[in-house]
Image (cartoon, grey):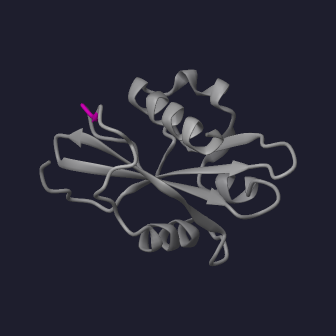
Amino acid sequence: MSETTELPRLVILHKQSTSARVRFMTLGDSVLAFSPLPEPAALRAEDYSSKLSFHPTAALRAAEKKLGLAEGGLEPVPDFCIWLDTPHGDQAVLLAACTSIDPPFAAAEKQGGKFIAITEARRLPLVEREILRRTYEHVLG
């Protein structure tokens, strides 16, 4: 594993408490907050509950601030950290869940984003679709 050069990217999701409907925040053409991956980026084949991971607090607080959410508006999804190989070094991807009853649609829209179901992710790059598949499996068990 080479040295990582950036804070972890986040996949931000909302899971409806009554129906278990899962939606992912997209920002522009990416599901990774707050910038798309550099080309080429490759998902590691290893288990996504990597032993080496980041403490998510700094990344979550920065995301809440950028989205205009109150502190505590995002919470980390435990035991999820996947790694990507990029030309700039290792890149970690963490999973954050919205704590609100409904997805924060307005916050996403202010950043040029929206919430989508996994079935709407066909337009995303292959590596991001694979990341979504792994997050979906992790959340639903």
**Is residue 43 in view?**
no
The quadrant in which residue 21 appears is: top right
Residue at 43%, 26% (x, y): give it: 125
* Image coords of residue 99 (percent x, y): 71, 64
Q: Nearer the viewer, residue 6 or 109?
A: 6
**Is residue 21 in view?**
yes
In reply to whether residue 42 is colored magenta, the answer given is: yes
Vertical placement of 136 versus 71: above or below?
Answer: above
Instruction: Using residue 58 as the reference point, say whether residue 17 is left or right of it.
Output: right
Residue at 36%, 58% (x, y): give it: 8
Vertical placement of 83 versus 64: above or below?
Answer: above
In reply to whether residue 73 is colored magenta, the answer given is: no
The quadrant in which residue 9 appears is: bottom left
Instruction: Using residue 104 as the reference point, say whether residue 92 is left or right of it.
Output: left
* Image coords of residue 109 (percent x, y): 68, 51
Position of the C terminus by quadrant: top right
Q: Main secondary structure of the magenta part?
A: loop
Vertical placement of 31 versus 62: above or below?
Answer: above
* Image coords of residue 129 (percent x, y): 48, 28
Count of numbered marks: 0
Instruction: Using residue 92 as the reference point, say whether residue 125 is left or right of it.
Output: right
Q: Nearer the viewer, residue 30 or 93?
A: 93
Residue lying furthest left: 2
* Image coords of residue 19 (percent x, y): 85, 43
| Highlighted range, magenta | 40-44
Residue lying furthest bottom: 71
Residue at 49%, 35% (x, y): give it: 134
Residue at 76%, 63% (x, y): give it: 100
